[in-house]
Image (cartoon, rainbow, N blue to C red):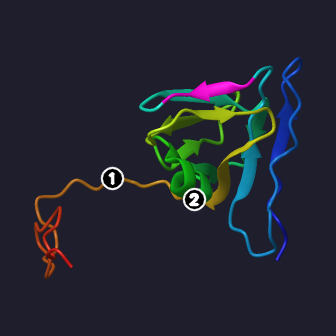
């Protein structure tokens, strides 16, 4: 299967971090790194848009999803907000990762630290069809927690 081409540009003057990369052959997401001139301390309860120094050109019909790294979440309580974040095919601004520290201790982000994962995903656009008649299902209107505790 041929890989989808994802064009990437470094922002002139930004601290140059390694490009996003797949860490294993079976990885779904590429780790993306912080582009910082100085360390960033993320205090408990704080959130910050962490720069990557990169601009992506996502092919039409695709998005890039920004997802948390499980190790940061488990070990430090640091996660991405607005997850998964979406980079649309027509966005040409800097990729910034919205990180939040849900942990009890300050967390320091250094230049080049892996801060999130990027997953390329195909998207479909919907055509809305307004109707007064929808099909019935066994679930019906059951929402939040309707299937019970376990």
Q: Which dot marks residue 128?
A: 1
Residue toward you, 112 or 98: 112
Does 130 sit above or below residue 135?
A: above
Placement of the C terminus among the 4 image quadrants: bottom left
Q: Which dot marks residue 92?
A: none
- Confirm whether residue 96 shows in the render: no
Residue toward you, 147 or 9: 147
Lower sequence index among marks 2 and 1: 2
Tell me residue 57's x, y (percent). 76, 40
Does 46 sit above or below residue 89?
A: above
**Residue most extreme to the bottom:** 138
User: Residue at left 78%, top 30%?
Assistant: 35
Tell me residue 15's x, y (percent). 86, 25
User: Residue at left 45%, top 32%?
Assistant: 44
Compared across the picture, whether 147 is left or right of 6 comes to left
Q: Give the residues drawn in magenta, as a range.
A: 39-43
Does 54 sit above or below residue 2?
A: above
User: Residue at left 84%, top 22%?
Assistant: 14
Q: Magenta stretch mostly in which secondary structure?
A: strand
Compared across the picture, whether 21 is left or right of 78 comes to right
């Amino acid at each position: 299967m041929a890989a989808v081409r994802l064009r990437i540009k470094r922002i002139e003057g930004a601290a140059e971090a390694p490009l996003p990369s797949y860490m294993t052959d079976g990885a779904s997401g590429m780790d993306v790194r912080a582009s910082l001139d100085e360390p960033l301390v993320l205090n408990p309860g704080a959130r910050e848009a962490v720069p990557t120094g990169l601009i992506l050109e996502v092919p039409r019909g695709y998005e890039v999803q920004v997802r948390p790294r499980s190790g940061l979440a488990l070990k430090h309580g640091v996660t991405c907000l607005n997850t998964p974040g979406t980079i649309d095919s027509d966005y040409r601004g800097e990729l910034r990762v919205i990180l939040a520290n849900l942990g009890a201790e300050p967390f320091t982000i250094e230049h080049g630290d892996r801060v999130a994962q990027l997953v390329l995903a195909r998207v479909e656009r919907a055509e809305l069809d307004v109707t007064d008649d929808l099909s019935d299902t066994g679930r019906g209107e059951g929402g939040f927690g309707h299937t019970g505790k376990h």
